[in-house]
Image (spheres, rainbow, N blue to C red):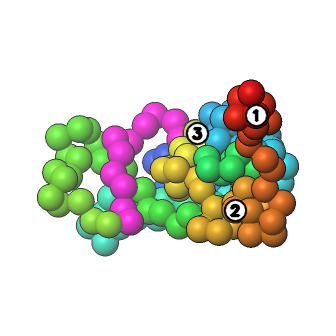
């Protein structure tokens, strides 16, 4: 886990503090299995606030570029990451909104004793990933090779020729 502040959520939201930073992609441990390479960095910005209803909240912005592994051709695939979320903190689980009452783009969590910015950033990155990372149609390396006439002969084609000649 990368180094990021662990904050008092009451103070952070009451004073409307702001925390900004950068984290190398290689330091996001739970993300590594989805990556083709771990180069680059992620920028984040968290700002405390209060909702019009008086609930403590924060906005979290996360941005950067990831090199994901395309699940079709297994090569690198650039993915622009841009997350802008609002997280409202409630006192207990009973105050969490029902599914029907949830507002799109606003997440609600039970107010923690400590606000771990590193965990929040990593979770937002993971939630922003595509379910299955694949290049757009026609952009995978095998597709490009086939279009360029570079497709290789099937490995068992020589065996087929031998079988037919005997």
First reached walking from the N terminus: tag 2 or tag 1: 2
- Report crowding for label 3: few under 14, some 14 to 19, many 20 or more residues within 10 A (C-alpha): some
User: Would you call the spot at circle 1 few (<14 residues within 10 Å), some (14-19), or many (20 or more)?
Assistant: few
Label count reads 3
Task: Decide: is 70 above or below 110.
Answer: below
The answer for how far apart the CA atoms under marks 3 and 1 are is 64 Å
Magenta span covers which residues?
Answer: 105-116
Task: Kindly indicate whether the residue at mark 3 contacts the one at mark 2 (C-beta within 8 angstroms).
Answer: no
The reply to whether discs 2 and 1 touch (Cβ–Cβ < 8 Å) is no
| Residue at 44%, 62% in the rendered image | 86
Q: Which residue is mark 1?
A: 165
Give the labeled residue for mark 2.
Answer: 143
- The x and y percentages for residue 66 are 72, 55
x 59%, y 68%: residue = 137
Quarter holding residue 2: top right
| Closer to the eye: label 2 or 3 | 2
Q: Is residue 17 visible?
A: no
Q: Nearer the viewer, residue 34 or 96?
A: 34
> In front: 164, or 39?
164
Badges 3 and 1: C-beta atoms under 8 Å apart?
no
Asked where in the image residue 34 lies, by quadrant, the reply is top right
State the residue position of label 3: 119
Q: x, y percentage for residue 91?
A: 29, 42
- Which of discs 2 and 1 lies nearer the camera? The answer is 1
SS for callout 2? helix
């Amino acid at each position: 886990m990368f180094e990021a502040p662990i904050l008092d959520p009451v103070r952070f939201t009451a004073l409307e503090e702001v925390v900004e930073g950068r984290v190398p992609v290689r330091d996001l441990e739970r993300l590594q299995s989805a990556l083709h390479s771990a180069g680059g960095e992620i920028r984040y910005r968290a700002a405390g606030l209060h909702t019009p209803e008086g609930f403590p909240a924060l906005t979290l912005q996360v941005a950067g570029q990831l090199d994901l592994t395309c699940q079709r051709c297994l090569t690198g695939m650039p993915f622009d990451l841009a997350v802008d979320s609002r997280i409202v903190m409630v006192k207990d689980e009973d105050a969490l909104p029902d599914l029907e009452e949830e507002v799109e783009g606003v997440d609600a969590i039970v107010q923690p004793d400590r606000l771990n910015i590193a965990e929040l950033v990593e979770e937002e990155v993971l939630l922003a990933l595509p379910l299955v990372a694949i290049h757009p149609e026609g952009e995978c390396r095998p597709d490009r090779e086939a279009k360029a006439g570079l497709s290789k002969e099937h490995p068992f084609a020589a065996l087929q020729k031998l079988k037919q000649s005997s």
